[in-house]
Image (cartoon, coloured by chain):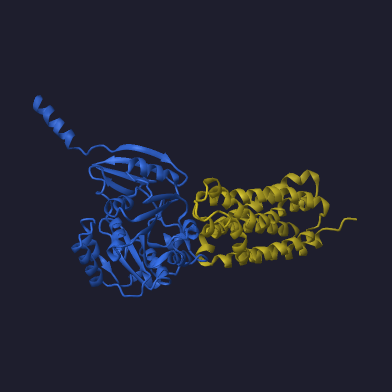
Chain colours: A yellow, B blue
C-alpha cells in the first residue's frame, strides 16, 4: 500500500505537469501568437521548474521527511492551477501591453515575451509538482543498499505519468474539454495529491 | 545512324524540363524551397505548394483562389487600407501593387525567411504603400489601431499531414478582434483549405459557423483549380446577393477600373447558401478548438 501510494503520487504529479505544458501552449497562443518561440519557452520554462523543484524538493525532504508537509503546498497550487484562466489576463497584460503600439515588437521580445508568459503562469505549479519526486525518493529509501532501485522506480513512475499526460492531453482532453475545464481537472488532481500526501502521513513515523 | 541520333535528340527534347531548385532553406517553421518548373516559379513549404508564379509574367500562373481577394475592390472601389495575414510568395500583394497602387497594404508574416524569399524570388516590393511586418497576425491585429477596409486571411502551417490554419486564427475571439479592426463597411476574406462537401468539409463548416457568430453575413467562393473555399464575412447588414455583386462589378467595368481579367468569372462564383457541413460543425472559441476541427 505504501509503495502503491508513492507510485501514484509521483506518476500523477508527472501527469499534471505535462497536462499543464501541452494545454498551456494552446492557452498562451492567443496572447503570444503561433510563433515557434511559444513552444520553446513553454518547454524551457517547464524544464526550469523541474530543475528548481527537484533541487528544493530534495532539500525539503531532508528537513521534513513526512509527506503531510506537502499537503498545504499542493492545495495552494491546486487553487492556482484551477484559477489560471482568471489570473492569466491581467498578468499577461502586463507583459504584452508594455510595447509601444505604433511600432512592431522587436524580434528579441517576440522571442522572450512568451518565456515570461510561461514563467508567470506555469513556473510555480510545475515547481511544486516537481518537488514530489525527490521528496518521495527520500521517503521510499528504506535502506541505503536499495536507494538505487527505489529512486529508479520513482523516476520511472513519474516519467510514465508524464508520457500519459502528453498523449491524454493531445489525443483526448483538448478534443473533449475546453481549456478552463482542463485546468480545473489539473487543479482537481493536484488537490487529490494534497489529500493523498495527508493520507500517506500514517506510513511514516514522525521524527523523534 | 544519324537518323537514330536525331530521334534520340527529339525524344530528349520532348521530356519535361527538369525542375531547378533555385533556393532552399530550413526556417523556424518550414523546409522552404523555391524551384523553377515548366515556366513556373514555385514556392513550397514542407513539399506543399504555397505559391505559383509564371516566370514570363509575374501576374500570371497563381492559384485562382487568390483572385477572390480582389472582391473587396468590387464591393468598394474607394477602399484605402487592406491587411493581409500571411505572405507566402505574395501573389495577392503583387497583384494589388499592380492593379490598385493607391491602396495601402499591410502584410503580416510570422516567418522572416519567407519575407526574404518573397522579396528576392517573387518580386514582392516594400514601399510606403506596402509594408511587411514580421509578427503573428493576431498579436499584430490586437496592437494595431488602424481600421482596415478589408482583412485577407491566408496564414497556414504546413506539416506532414497537410496545411492547417493556426488555431488562434480561427476562433470567435479572433473574428471579434478582426471585426473591431474593420471599418463599418469592412469585409474579411478567409482562405480555407478544404472543400464544401468532401475533403475537409468539416473545417469549412466550422469556420463558416464561427464567422457567422460575429459577422451578420457570411458568403463563400469555391476555388476552381485548387481545394480552397474562400469565405467572405461582411460587417454591413445590407444583404449582399449575386445580382448586387454583379451590378457593382458592372459599374466598375464601365468606369474602367483596372482588375484581373478573370474577375467576371470570380464574381459569378459567389454563393450565399449555408455550406452543408456547417450544421454539424462546432463553433470554435479560444477555450475550445479541438485539434480535429482543423484536420
Residue A205 as seen in the image, left or right of residue A121: right
Could one spot residue A164 in this view of the protein? no
Q: Which residue occupies 9% across, 28% down?
A: B3
Q: Which of B167 and A130 lies nearest the eye of the viewer?
A: B167
Residue sitting farthest toward the right: A208
Please state the horizontal and vertical placement of residue B267, each as a whole percent of the image.
24, 64
Quadrant for the N terminus of chain A, please.
bottom right
Residue B49 as seen in the image, left or right of residue A193: left
Q: Which of B79 and B200 lies nearest the eye of the viewer?
A: B79
Residue sitting farthest toward the bottom: B238
Q: Which of A20 and B178 lies nearest the eye of the viewer?
A: B178
Could one spot residue A83 in this view of the protein? yes
Please state the horizontal and vertical placement of residue A181, each as a whole percent of the image.
58, 68
Residue A133 as seen in the image, left or right of residue B290: right
Q: Which residue occupies 24% across, 68% down?
A: B248
Quadrant for the C terminus of chain A, please.
bottom right
Please state the horizontal and vertical placement of residue B90, each as a whole percent of the image.
34, 49
Please state the horizontal and vertical placement of residue A33, each as a whole percent of the image.
50, 55
Amino acid at each position: 500500500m505504501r509503495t502503491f501510494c508513492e507510485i501514484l503520487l509521483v506518476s500523477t504529479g508527472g501527469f499534471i505537469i505535462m497536462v499543464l505544458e501541452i494545454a498551456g501552449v494552446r492557452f498562451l497562443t492567443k496572447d503570444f501568437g503561433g510563433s515557434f518561440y511559444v513552444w520553446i519557452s513553454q518547454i524551457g520554462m517547464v524544464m526550469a521548474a523541474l530543475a528548481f523543484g527537484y533541487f528544493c524538493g530534495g532539500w525539503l525532504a531532508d528537513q521534513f521527511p513526512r509527506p503531510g508537509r506537502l499537503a498545504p503546498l499542493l492545495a495552494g497550487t491546486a487553487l492556482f492551477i484551477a484559477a489560471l484562466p482568471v489570473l492569466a489576463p491581467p498578468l499577461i497584460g502586463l507583459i504584452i501591453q508594455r510595447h509601444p503600439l505604433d511600432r512592431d515588437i522587436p524580434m528579441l521580445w517576440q522571442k522572450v515575451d512568451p518565456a515570461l508568459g510561461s514563467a508567470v503562469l506555469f513556473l510555480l505549479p510545475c515547481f511544486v509538482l516537481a518537488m514530489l519526486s525527490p521528496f518521495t525518493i527520500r521517503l521510499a529509501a528504506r535502506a541505503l543498499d536499495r536507494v538505487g532501485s527505489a529512486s529508479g522506480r520513482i523516476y520511472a513512475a513519474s516519467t510514465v505519468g508524464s508520457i500519459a499526460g502528453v498523449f491524454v492531453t493531445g489525443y483526448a482532453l483538448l478534443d473533449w474539454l475546453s481549456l478552463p475545464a482542463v485546468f480545473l481537472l489539473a487543479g482537481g488532481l493536484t488537490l487529490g495529491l494534497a489529500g493523498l500526501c495527508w493520507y500517506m502521513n500514517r506510513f511514516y513515523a514522525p521524527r523523534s | 545512324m544519324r537518323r537514330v541520333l536525331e530521334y534520340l535528340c527529339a525524344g530528349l527534347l520532348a521530356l519535361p524540363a527538369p525542375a531547378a531548385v533555385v533556393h532552399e532553406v530550413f526556417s523556424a517553421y518550414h523546409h522552404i524551397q523555391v524551384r523553377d518548373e515548366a515556366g513556373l516559379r514555385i514556392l513550397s513549404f514542407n513539399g506543399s505548394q504555397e505559391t505559383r508564379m509564371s516566370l514570363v509574367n509575374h501576374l500570371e500562373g497563381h492559384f485562382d483562389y487568390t483572385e477572390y481577394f480582389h472582391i473587396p475592390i468590387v464591393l468598394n472601389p474607394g477602399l484605402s487600407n487592406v491587411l493581409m495575414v500571411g505572405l507566402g510568395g505574395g501573389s495577392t500583394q503583387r497583384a494589388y501593387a499592380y492593379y490598385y497602387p493607391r491602396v495601402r497594404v499591410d502584410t503580416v508574416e510570422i516567418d522572416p525567411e519567407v519575407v526574404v524569399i518573397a522579396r528576392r524570388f517573387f518580386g514582392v516590393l516594400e514601399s510606403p504603400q506596402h509594408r511587411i511586418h514580421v509578427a503573428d497576425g493576431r498579436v499584430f491585429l490586437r496592437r494595431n489601431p488602424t481600421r482596415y477596409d478589408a482583412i485577407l486571411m491566408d496564414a497556414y502551417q504546413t506539416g506532414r499531414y497537410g496545411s492547417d490554419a493556426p488555431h488562434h486564427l480561427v476562433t470567435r475571439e479572433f473574428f471579434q478582434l478582426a471585426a473591431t479592426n474593420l471599418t463599418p463597411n469592412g469585409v474579411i476574406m478567409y482562405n480555407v483549405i478544404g472543400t464544401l462537401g468532401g475533403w475537409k468539409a468539416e473545417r469549412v463548416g466550422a469556420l463558416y459557423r464561427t464567422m457567422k457568430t460575429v459577422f451578420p453575413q457570411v458568403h463563400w467562393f469555391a476555388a476552381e483549380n485548387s481545394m480552397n473555399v474562400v469565405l467572405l464575412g461582411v460587417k454591413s447588414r445590407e444583404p449582399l446577393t449575386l445580382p448586387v455583386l454583379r451590378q457593382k462589378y458592372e459599374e466598375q467595368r464601365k468606369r474602367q477600373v483596372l482588375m484581373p481579367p478573370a474577375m467576371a468569372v470570380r464574381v459569378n462564383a459567389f454563393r450565399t447558401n449555408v455550406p452543408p457541413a456547417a450544421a454539424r460543425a462546432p463553433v470554435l472559441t479560444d477555450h475550445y478548438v479541438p485539434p480535429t476541427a482543423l484536420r
